[in-house]
Image (tube, grey):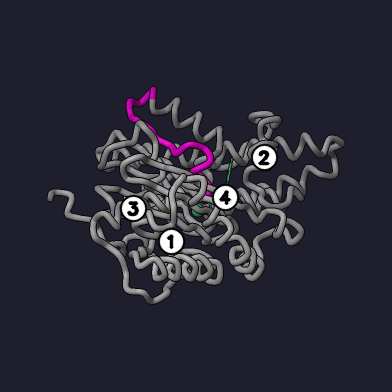
């Protein structure tokens, strides 16, 4: 089965062609960084307009790169939520119309399910069941995953998502948008231990997260030290390092706790913050020491992309799922409302 995947939930237009026999045939990505940079964050209306401009040319491009004709497509998968409603509707309208014109089924994909399944695109794909840590700009959650569509949320952020905290902390120190990768880069020249940030909610039982206090902690540290410091760049870097260390260690503590609680030795990490090098390093070290396995998607598939949507959609289409031709998208969509593909025991 050959499936075109369409991702347009936020500020990236991603398209891909996934072939259930040959694997990923092609993927293309257009980032809107330049569109939103001058505003310091994503402007929803501009995002929708940019998606509309790029969706069809990118679809043509990815089909050509995949070395197929439109007629060879067996289905189209698109992100139906959660995300920015106008951005979602742009992708949904293109995907559904194309499916209707080609007389093939279209299937809705949950954006976070796309992220969660992205590590399964790799050669050493983890087997079910496993514990998943999903860390993106909009979500931070731990889930017990028994199979495709069987997601039991065992912990989540009570306020800011980890990526959101990275972005806001970066913005507050004048690092612009998108802040997460810039802050992570800056942290490389930061000195460990110059500032000590708290590890929120690790001193009590449970698997929930709270990152908004860290952002405030970073702001206070920045305000208190700015006056007396000549080297503002080093100060920024030291704060970035302390902030990153705190987020990474908090995630690490909760992941180990979740594995213990679930009786699992398999961890899967996905979402934009999964691209963070220190998180990857620390989790690999912990996995070796505490005898669990950890899987990440390749770097480019941690952040938003069409490949994860084509892949997740292909699995659902193969299982016979698709929706009637109404064009539907949801700004909010709880992940545990998804239909499992089949009973894990079946
Ligand atoms: O998964 P994603 O592309 O979009 C959402 O579904 O939200 O994640 C984007 C988030 C942003 O908050 C971005 O700052 C963060 O992931 N991010 C990073 C890194 N790369 C992206 N955060 C920390 N370190 C990184 N290297
Ligand atoms: Zn995402």
Q: Residues within 10 Å of mark 4 (few under 14, many from 20)?
A: some
Which residue has dot 4 on it? 29
Q: CA distance from mark 1 to mark 3?
A: 11 Å
| Disc nearer the start of the sequence (3/4) | 4
The residue most toward the top is: 289
Asked which quadrant contains residue 288, the reply is top left
Point out which mark residue 240 bears: 2
**Above or below: residue 119 compared with residue 335:** above
Q: Earlier in the sequence, mark 2 or mark 1?
A: 1
Q: CA distance from mark 3 to mark 4?
A: 19 Å
Look at 43% across and 37% down and name the residue there. Answer: 296
Determine whether label 1 and label 3 are within 8 Å by CB. no
Q: Earlier along the polypeptide chain: callout 4 or callout 1?
A: 4
Q: Tag 1, which secondary structure? A: strand
Q: Position of residue 196 (x, y in %)?
A: 62, 37
Mark 2 and mark 1: Cα distance apart in space: 36 Å
Q: Which residues are magenta?
A: 288-305
Numbered mark located on residue 314 in the image: 3
Question: Which residue is located at x 28 percent, y 51 percent?
Answer: 148
User: Would you say residue 81 sits in the magenta stretch?
Assistant: no
Q: Nearer the viewer, mark 2 or mark 3?
A: 3
Q: Nearer the viewer, residue 153 or 10?
A: 10
Secondary structure of the residue carrying numbered label 3: helix
Q: What is the CA distance from the residue labelled 2 to the residue labelled 4?
A: 28 Å
Q: State the residue in front, 297 or 64.
A: 64
Residue linked to disc 1: 78
Earlier in the chain: of badge 2 and badge 4, it is: 4
Camera-near label (2 vs 1) is 1
């Amino acid at each position: 089965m050959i499936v075109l995947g369409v991702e347009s939930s936020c500020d990236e237009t991603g398209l891909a062609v996934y072939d259930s026999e040959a694997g990923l045939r092609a993927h293309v990505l257009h980032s809107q960084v330049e569109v939103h940079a001058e505003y310091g964050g994503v402007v929803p209306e501009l995002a929708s307009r940019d998606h509309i401009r790029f969706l069809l040319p990118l679809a043509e491009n990815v089909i050509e790169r995949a070395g197929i004709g439109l007629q060879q497509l067996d289905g189209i998968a698109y992100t139906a939520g959660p995300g920015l409603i106008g951005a979602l509707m742009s992708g949904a309208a293109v995907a559904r119309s194309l499916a209707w014109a080609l007389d093939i089924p279209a299937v809705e994909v949950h954006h976070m399910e796309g992220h969660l399944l992205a590590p399964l695109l790799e050669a050493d794909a983890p087997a079910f069941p496993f514990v998943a840590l999903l860390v993106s700009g909009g979500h931070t959650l731990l889930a017990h995953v028994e199979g495709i569509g069987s997601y039991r949320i065992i912990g989540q952020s009570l306020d800011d998502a980890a990526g959101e905290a990275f972005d806001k902390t970066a913005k507050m120190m004048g690092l612009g948008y998108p802040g997460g990768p810039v802050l992570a880069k800056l942290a490389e020249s930061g000195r460990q231990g110059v500032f000590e940030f708290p590890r929120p909610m690790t001193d009590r039982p449970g698997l929930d997260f709270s990152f908004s206090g860290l952002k405030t902690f970073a702001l206070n540290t920045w305000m208190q030290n700015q006056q007396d410091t000549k080297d503002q760049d080093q100060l920024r870097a030291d704060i970035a390092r302390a902030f990153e260390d705190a987020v990474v260690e908090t995630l690490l503590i909760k992941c180990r706790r979740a594995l213990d609680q679930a009786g699992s030795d398999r961890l899967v990490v996905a979402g934009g913050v999964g691209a963070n090098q220190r998180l990857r390093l620390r989790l690999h070290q912990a996995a070796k020491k505490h005898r669990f396995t950890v899987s990440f998607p390749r770097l480019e598939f941690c952040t938003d992309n069409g490949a994860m949507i084509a892949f997740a959609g292909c699995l659902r289409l193969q299982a016979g799922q698709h929706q009637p031709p109404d064009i539907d998208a949801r700004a909010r969509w709880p992940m545990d409302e998804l239909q499992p593909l089949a009973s894990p025991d079946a």
